[in-house]
Amino acid sequence: MPLFTDEHDLLRDSLRKFIAREINPYCDEWEEARIFPAHELFKKLGNEGFLGLTKPTEYGGSALDYSYALVMAEELGRVDAGGVSLAIGVQTDMCTPALARFGSDELKKEFLAPSIAGDLVGCIGVSEVGAGSDVASLKTYARKDGDDYVISGGKMWITNGIQADWMCCLANTSDDKPHKNKTLIIVPLDSKGVERARKLHKLGMWSSDTAQIFFDEVRVPQRYAIGPEGAGFMLQMLQFQEERLWGAANSLTAMETAITETVKYARERKAFGKSILDNQVVHFRIAELLTEVESLRALIYRAAELFISGKDVTRLASMAKLKSGRLGREVADSCLQYWGGMGYMWESKISRMFRDSRLISVGGGADEVMLGIIAKLEGILPGKG
C-alpha cells in the first residue's frame, strides 16, 4: 500500500496554493521586519484546517495519520523564508503533540482546540542558556504551592516566543534523578512574572521571532501539567520524534527548490563561452545532490511508515535529522557557489537558504546528540553497550 493517496495530493495542492497566495508574497517584507504576523497567518491556516491534521476531531482536528503531517512539512519547504515554515511547524508538530496525546480533556479544550483553530499561538520551552541539547541539565523549577506550581527559571531560543500565547514548558518538579524529575507544563505567557526579555537576533530564520524568556515566581494551576508528574522527560523525547521527522521532511522541498533554481541560473549564466551548467563538475555535482536528497527522502518515508504503525522510530528519526542538517549545509553551499557573486548577495534566495539551513544541525538536538543517540541504540557508545 503506497504511503500517499489522492487525499495527500489534494492536501499538497491546497497548501501549495495557500503558500503562493498568503505567504511567499510577503516573505521579503517579513524577513526585513525580523518577524511575521503569527496570529494573522495562523488564523488563516486554522480556517483552512492546516493546523490540526493529526489532532483529534473533538478539538477541531482532522484525526489523520502522520503521513499528512509529513506532506505538510514537505510543502512548507516551498516557503521562501525558512523562519515562517519553522514557526508553523512549532505550532503543529513541536509544542502540541504531547498535549494532544497526554493532556487532560480540560487542558485540550483550553489550549489545543484554540491552537488548532489558529486563535492561540504556542511555543515549546525546553532549551536554556546552560541546557540546549543536554535536556537533562535544565534548571527551570516548578515547586508546588497549594493547587499551583510556582515556576522560576528561564528558557532560551524560543521560536514564536515574542508572539506566543502559551508555552509547553519542561521544568523540574522534584529533586529526583534528571530523567524522572521533569514535567511538561502549560504556561500562559500573559501570566504575572513572565518576562519576554528580548527578541534574539539570529544568523538566519529572520522572519521567525525567537525569544529569551524569564520566569519569576510564575504561578500556574497544577492541572496545567501534561501527563503524569515526573514523566516530562519521556514525553518530550516522544515529542522530539515528531519534531525531528518534521524538520527532516521540511528540508526536502527546500533543498529541491534550491537545486532547481540553481540549475535555471547556471543554465543561463555564461562564462568562458558556455553556460555554467555545461561544465561537467557542475552538472555532475547537481546529479549527486539530487541523489542524496532522494536517499534522505527514502529514509524519512520509512521512518514515517513505522511511526504511523506505532513503532519507536527514535533511531531512524535521529538519522534523518542528522542527515538533513548535514545535507542542507552541503546543498546550500554547493548551490551558492554556482551563483557566483550573486549568490553572495544578502538579498538572494540562495544566500537566505544558506543562512536558514544552518539551524537544522543545531536546533531540536545538535548533530552530536543525534550521533550519540544512534551510537547508544546500536550498543557502541562507551559504557552503554
Image (spheres, rainbow, N blue to C red):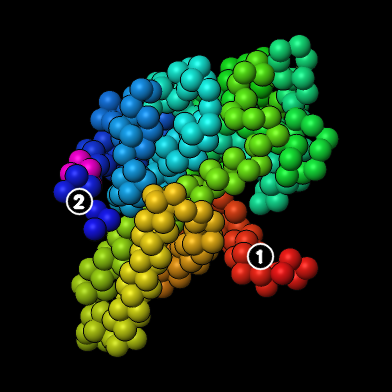
Q: Which residues are magenta?
A: 10-14
User: Could you tell me which quadrant the N terminus lies in?
Assistant: bottom left
> In percent of the image, x 41 and y 30: which residue is there?
38
Q: Nearer the viewer, residue 294 or 314?
A: 314
> In percent of the image, x 36 and y 37: which residue is there?
54
Choose the circle earlier in sequence order: 1 or 2.
Answer: 2
Q: Which mark is residue 376?
A: 1
Q: Is residue 109 visible?
A: yes
Q: Which mark is residue 273?
A: none
Reply above or below: 192 against 304: above
Q: Give the Cα distance between marks 1 and 2.
A: 36 Å
Q: Main secondary structure of the magenta part?
A: helix
* x then y, percent, for residue 176: 81, 38
Q: Nearer the viewer, residue 220 or 192?
A: 220
Residue labelled with disc 2: 5
Q: Residue furthest top?
A: 146
Relative to residue 82, is residue 24 drawn left or right? left
Disc 2 element: loop
